[in-house]
Image (cartoon, rainbow, N blue to C red):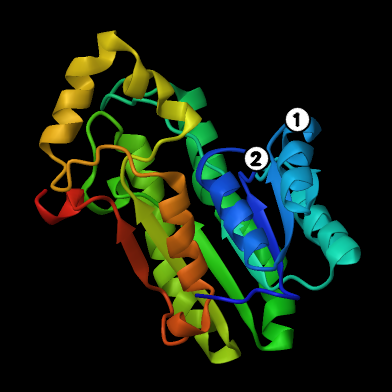
Amino acid sequence: MSDLKNRVALVTGGSSGIGEAIARKFAGAGAKVAVVASSGQDKADAVAKAIGGKGYVCDVRNAAAVAALVKQVESDLGPLDILVNSAGVFYPTVAGETPAVDIDRMVDINLKGSFHTLNAVAPGMKDRKRGWVVNIASCAGIVGVVPFSLYSATKAAVIMLTKVSGRELAPFGVHVNAIAPGNTATPMNAAIRTEPEHKAVHDVMKSITPSQTVFTDPADIAGGALFLVSDTARPMYGAVLSMDEGVTTGL
């Protein structure tokens, strides 16, 4: 679908889950990939070694650290063409019972982190008159998911960030789009997928999933990301690509 030869991509959350799948997909298409983990250089290095990229560690909550990361990546690999914001966390947050520490962590990583990375890469992309930003949102940001009110709110905010910045940066040839995955087979939900005591939860998920594929393969989400940075997606600015097995069509 897309030839990313000579393009430089930075993927936050790139050491596992959807981010890792995207890093692998982009490298397979020829990109030079900066694999960014939130902690654990060994995790980033392991994925980077497997795909011929380079590993980095950065806490996206820290704007100065993000700016330094972008500067280092561009020194190592060249000017950034692609940013993927895949770093994120989620916890159950029952309305009226959300601990302050969870509020801070989810807002700081899921939302502020996306702002920090966009702030760091947008000036260079605007100067070069080209660039691609893919934000990993969630179907929870479209319909809301119980009991994940705060997670849903942060992902709804990421979707709006995508729409507005997509419009603002379009005149400069910078494409900002998002993917809204549904349940995806990542380490965060391994217990629900594999442990018998969570069968009831799994069955509920299946009942609201039209395709009956309860957990999407991260490689499929990565295919969507590859599409969004391809020439085929040239007219797309501020778009949200739903990849949720049809869940949001009926909710």
Q: Residue at x 36, y 49 (%)?
A: 138
Numbered label tally: 2
What is the crowding at mark 1: few (fewer than 14 residues within 10 Å), some, or many (at least 20)? some
Per the image, the residue denoted by label 1 is 40
Q: Is residue 44 above or below residue 86?
A: above
Q: Secondary structure beneath disc 2?
A: loop
Residue type indicated by callout 2: Ser
- Helix or strand or loop: what does disc 1 sit on? loop
Residue 57 in view (yes/no): no
Can you say whether 103 is above or below 158 in the image? above
Whole-Å distance between the Cαs marked 1 and 2? 9 Å
Which numbered circle lies on residue 15? 2
- Please say if the residues under marks 1 and 2 sit with CB atoms less than 8 Å apart: yes
Horizontally, residue 159 falls left or right of residue 126, namely left
**Mark 1, mark 2: which one is toward the viewer?**
2
As drawn, 230 above or below 147:
below
Give whichever of discs 1 and 2 has the lower sequence position.
Answer: 2
- Give the quarter of the image for residue 209: top left
**Where residue 233 sits: x, y (%)?**
44, 80
Which residue is at 49% across, 75% downward?
A: 1
Q: Is residue 8 visible?
A: yes
Residue placed most toward the observer, 141 or 73? 73
Q: How many residues crowd mark 2 within 10 Å: few (<14), some (14–19), many (20+)? A: many
Please provide percent x and percent y for residue 154.
41, 46
Q: Which residue corresponds to the image point at 79% horizontal and 39% vertical from the top-left? A: 45
Q: Is residue 202 left or right of residue 192?
A: left
Write the residue at 17% across / 17% down: 200
Q: Position of residue 206 (x, y in %)?
A: 17, 34
> Which amino acid type is marked by label 1?
Gly
Q: Is residue 126 above or below residue 178?
A: below
Q: Which mark is residue 175?
A: none
